[in-house]
């Protein structure tokens, strides 16, 4: 798939996700719930896409979002990653979040994604793996990405 095809597939898979309008729709609370509200409440996908997104700050917010909020905002982050596959900081935080789909304490916001949404994520991560496989420095990350994509296809 090309990057444009992937972006269209992501948009289609997450098309039904609705913007959180209240604090309760955005976050389930927790110690960082107030930061999620500060960073995301009232912000559309377009606002996030055109604003300043700091992976080390904003990706942590995803662990405190409701499943519906994750489904709304995750496509923006996937498009960021597709646009700049060399963004190591974003990949570190995005992949750490995405790995939460399995394990003893699997993240409900990831396990509740539809098959189409998980497939779109897997396709995106596979694309990144392909971009990195011939890069000596990123070859190890390419293998990790391919493994992560398989998790999303099998879950």
Image (cartoon, rainbow, N blue to C red):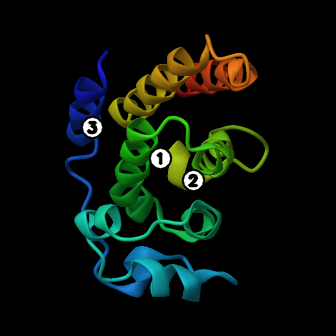
Q: Residue 73: percent from the left, percent from the top?
A: 38, 59
Q: Secondary structure at mark 2?
A: helix
Q: Which residue is mark 2?
A: 108
Which residue is painted at 46% across and 42% down in the image? 81
148 left or right of 73 in image: right
Please, is residue 71 above or below residue 87 in the view?
A: below
Disc number lying in front (1 or 3): 3
Q: Given contact means CB atoms under 8 Å apart, are the residues at marks 1 and 3 in contact?
A: no
Q: Residue at x 37, y 82 (%)?
A: 41
Which quarter of the rendered picture does the N terminus lie within?
A: top left
Q: Kindly identify the residue that appears in the image at 35 percent across and 70 percent down.
A: 51
Badge 3 element: helix
Residue at the front extreme of this rendering: 136
Q: Quadrant of residue 14?
A: top left
Image spot of residue 37 (x, y percent) = 47, 85
Foreground residue among 105 and 134? 134
Q: Which mark is residue 22?
A: none
Image check: 127 left or right of 141?
Answer: left
Please indicate whether residue 147 sits to the left or right of residue 73 in the image. right
Say the numbered circle drawn on residue 13.
3
Q: Earlier in the sequence, mark 2 or mark 3?
A: 3
Report which residue position mark 1 lands on. Answer: 112
Frontmost residue, 12 versus 28: 12
Task: Establish if 114 lies above or below 122.
Answer: below
Work out which quarter of the rendered image holds the C terminus and state it.
top right
Are the two marked residues, 1 and 2, in contact with CB atoms closer than 8 angstroms? Answer: yes
Within 10 angstroms of label 3, few (less than 14), some, or many (20 or more) residues? Answer: many
The count of marks equals 3
């Amino acid at each position: 798939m090309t990057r444009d095809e992937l972006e269209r597939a992501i948009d289609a898979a997450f098309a039904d996700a609705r913007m959180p309008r209240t604090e309760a729709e955005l976050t389930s609370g927790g110690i960082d719930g107030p930061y999620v509200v500060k960073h995301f409440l009232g912000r559309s996908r377009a606002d996030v896409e055109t604003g300043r997104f700091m992976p080390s700050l904003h990706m942590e917010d995803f662990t405190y979002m409701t499943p519906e909020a994750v489904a709304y905002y995750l496509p923006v982050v996937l498009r960021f990653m597709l646009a700049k596959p060399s963004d190591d900081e974003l990949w570190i935080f995005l992949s750490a979040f995405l790995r939460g789909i399995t394990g003893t304490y699997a993240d409900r916001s990831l396990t509740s994604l539809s098959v189409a949404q998980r497939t779109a994520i897997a396709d995106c991560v596979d694309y990144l793996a392909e971009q990195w496989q011939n890069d000596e420095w990123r070859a190890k990350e390419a293998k990790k990405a391919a493994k992560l994509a398989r998790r999303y296809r099998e879950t």
